Image: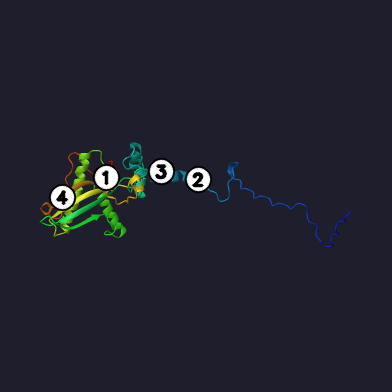
Amino acid sequence: MVAAPLKQPGTPTQPMNKPRPNPPQRESGGGGGGRRPGALPLPLRILLSLLIVWHLTAVALAPMSLPPSSPLVVDLAQRRMQWYLDALYLNHGYHFFAPSPGPGNLIRYELLDSRGSVIGQGEFPNTKDQWPRLRYHRHFMLADQAGLPSEDRQYRDYWQRVYLESYARHLLRTNEDAEMVRLRRIAHWPIPRDLALQGRKITDPEGYETLMEVTQRRSDVAPQGGEQTNIWPGQPIDIANRWNGVPR
């Protein structure tokens, strides 16, 4: 039989179970309900949640209202919520492109002399020629906004020609040696999946489509400030707000 070891004198007796600290008590509010210290009142939390939902809805509806879109979305974004979108500059014209992104737009032009020989050429937008980025973006918008979104092809082509001819006349004014400008608006489509699998590049010629070509001669150029914009009969257009495709 083995004897238990003797306890040394002066050694404190260890308790079997250590006492646990009491959990923190929650503050009791009026009506018997409780909330954590520093938590916002329930009505304020509900109000903030509604404001967040409203703002996120506005952020999503603004690009969704661009054509093609549903009349309901256009009515909500461009009428009922327009004051909020404009106040916070959310009505900027961005759009959702997936799952079917559309083409980019290019303006390519040739400057010709009196004998019809090419003496210069260029395109916009072009990251090499237009710099800094804001200047490139301005040229990008010039190429893109030459196409008016409309189901009426005759109306759409009319305004596209008006824009392109005005660009050509500006090029004649800024290039005194040119007697004629030949200008094309080109759609640059994303490369299809099957061509990408074949190793084709995004700059493959099959991805470009000429939408319209115009020619302007120096005899067509009026003095600076002497031109008047022709208005399509019976269909006045608000150029500043035409991006959304609906009247404001």
Residue 206 shows up from this direction: yes
Picture layout, residue 6 above or below residue 235: below
What's the distance in space between the residues labelled 2 and 4, CA to CA?
Answer: 63 Å
Q: Earlier in the sequence, mark 1 or mark 2?
A: 2
Mark 2 vs 3: CB contact within 8 A: no
Name the side, left or right, on which 216 lies relative to 88: left
Question: Callout 1: helix, strand or loop?
Answer: helix
Mark 1 vs 3: CB contact within 8 A: no
What's the distance in space between the residues labelled 1 and 2, CA to CA?
Answer: 39 Å
Q: Position of residue 221 (x, y in %)?
A: 13, 53
Q: Earlier in the sequence, mark 2 or mark 3?
A: 2
Q: Amino acid at mark 3?
A: Thr
Q: Earlier in the sequence, mark 3 or mark 4?
A: 3
Q: Which residue is mark 1?
A: 242
Q: Which residue is mark 4?
A: 215
Q: Amino acid at mark 1?
A: Arg
Q: Amino acid at mark 4?
A: Thr
Find residue 57 and name its label.
3
Q: Which residue is mark 2?
A: 45
